[in-house]
Image: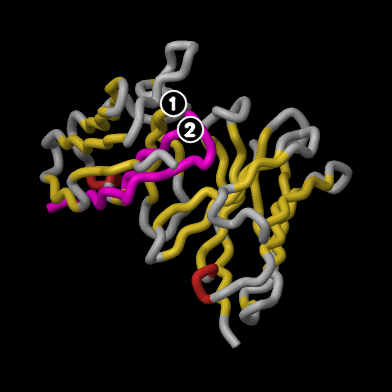
Amino acid sequence: DIVMTQSPLSLPVTPGEPASISCRSSQSLRHNNGYHYLDWYVQKPGQSPQLLIYLTSTRASGVPDRFSGSGSGTEFTLKISRVEAEDVGVYYCMQALQPPRTFGQGTKVEVK
Amino acid sequence: QVQLQESGPGLVKPSETLSLTCTVSGGSISRFVWSWVRQSPGMGLEWIGYIDYSGSTKYNPSVRGRVIISLDTPENQFSLRLSSVTTADTAVYYCARHSADYYGPFDVWGHGTTVTVSS
């Protein structure tokens, strides 16, 4: 199985300030087609996870442009340019390259 | 807009079989791939398996041998059966849709249903 490791696991942030979450995979997530199959999800309190970003850097429908994803190989990053109060939740990376799909441990984003 | 709704017993006895159904509304179950994902405090988010529109399945080795995912196209539903459950199977179970093919992200999720394994 591909192991996904996130850091930090807890991230207190000040509204208006940027935030960054790192995700590392135990093997490259690059497919032969050139795409990296790395997705980001957020689980807001009391809700099911929801898709934020797929294929490393493509925002899902309706996701604000303050969210961005980047990376390649085994190193990936989710950035929030200016955190808002509604961004609190647990953020997960997930690899979709090969079954079984595996998730990171989650990063809890809290607003100071 | 497509919506997913999980249903099934919230309490299952150890060694028995957990059975859940996901009902798809607002769209057809055909043409897409469908997964079950569970979340427990100890294991975080764990993908269980998927089924595609033709009925082909792929399962996580962690549950292989105990799991069956099936499709009921006329009812626009798919189901999860997990046998020989233990307390480790206690979790919130979600059904989810792959946005495109097998590699597609989970773009639609159900609200989740809590299953407790206890005697």
- Give yes or no for residue B1 being in the magenta stretch: no
Mark 1–mark 2 CB contact (< 8 Å): yes
Residue under the point 56% across and 74% down:
B86
Q: Which residue is mark 2?
A: A96
Q: Which residue is mark 1?
A: A37
Disc nearer the start of the sequence (1/2): 1
Which of the two residues, B94 or B80, is positioned nearer the viewer here?
Answer: B80
Dot 1 falls on which chain? A
Which of the two residues, A3 or A52, is positioned nearer the viewer here?
Answer: A3
Depicted A23 relative to depicted A72: above or below: below
The local crowd at label 1, few if under 14, some if 14 to 19, many if 20 or more residues have their Cα within 10 Å, is many
Depicted A107 relative to depicted A22: above or below: below
The kind of residue on which mark 2 rests is Ala
Q: Is residue A79 left or right of residue B100?
A: left
Q: Residue furthest top?
A: A33
Q: Quadrant of residue B94?
A: bottom right
The kind of residue on which mark 1 rests is Tyr
Does dot 2 land on a helix, a strand or a loop?
loop
Query: What is the tally of numbered marks visible in this picture?
Result: 2
Does dot 1 land on a helix, a strand or a loop?
loop
The magenta stretch is A91-112
Q: Position of residue B20 (x, y in %)?
A: 69, 61
Which of the two residues, A95 or A49, is positioned nearer the viewer here?
Answer: A95
Q: Position of residue B87 (x, y in %)?
A: 52, 76
Residue under the point 23% across and 31% down:
A79
Q: Position of residue B62 (x, y in %)?
A: 54, 55
Q: Is residue A26 left or right of residue A101?
A: left
Q: Position of residue B100 (x, y in %)?
A: 61, 26
